[in-house]
Amino acid sequence: MKAKVSWVDGMAFIGHSETGHKVVIDGDREGGAPSPMEMVLMSVGSCSAIDVVSILEKARQKIQNVDVELSAERAETIPKVFTSIHLNFVVTGTDVAEKHVERAVALSADKYCSVAKMLENAATITHSFEIKQA
């Protein structure tokens, strides 16, 4: 896998993926795009969400929406790495079984989410879920 990051101006950059996608990244707190650390947090959420949706679909659960609410704490000193990350999955659907959601979240956390697996050596990662009837 390869990528490139190009400086635009100020603290704004454009990331270019090997597959041709582009994303704006901004180190300025007042900037117009997510910061690198916000991108990492959203990456762990999207990585886990992909797993959960895939597993629930294979289990033939009637899901209509999956949101991942993320919260994180960072170290007080530089480098301000994540020290804890919490992912709360909000699964909306019809007659979604709790056991299937619990299993999907656990499989993502313990086996499949490569972003979380990388981060777990630096941060405590916890998970929760709730199910909403559509």
Image (spheres, rainbow, N blue to C red):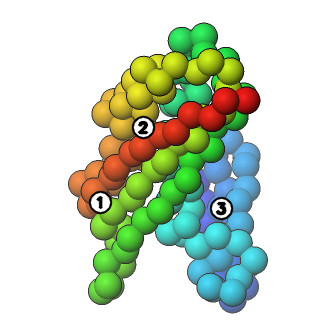
Would you identify the image quadrant in which residue 66 lies? top right
The structure residue drawn at horizontal position 50% and vertical position 69%, both measured from the top left corner, is: 37
Viewer-side residue, 31 vs 72? 72
Residue 41: x percent and y percent?
50, 59
Q: Looking at the picture, does residue 119 appear above or below residue 67?
A: below
Query: For this view, does 65 lie left or right of residue 112?
Result: right
Residue 84 location (% of width, % of height): 33, 63
Q: Are marks 3 and 1 in contact (CB under 8 Å)?
A: no
Image quadrant where one finds the C terminus = top right
Residue type at numbered disc 2: Cys
- Residue that badge 1 annotates: 123
Q: Residue at x 29, y 60 (%)?
A: 123
Q: Which residue is mark 2?
A: 113
What number is the disc on residue 99?
none
Mark 3, Cα crowd under 10 Å, few <14 / some 14-19 / many 20+, is some
Residue designated by label 3 = 15
Element assignment for label 3: strand
Crowd band around label 1 with a 10 angstrom C-alpha radius: few (<14), some (14–19), many (20+) = some
The reply to whether residue 87 is visible in this rendering is yes
Q: Is residue 3 left or right of residue 87?
A: right
Residue depicted at 73% across the width and 56% down the height? 22
Whole-number angstrom distance, CA of label 2 to CA of label 3: 22 Å
- Closest to the camera, between mark 3 and mark 1, is 1
Question: Looking at the image, is mark 2 or mark 3 nearer the viewer?
Answer: 2
The picture places residue 111, in percent across and down from the top left corner, at 33, 30
- From the viewer's perspective, tell me whether residue 42 is left or right of residue 134: left
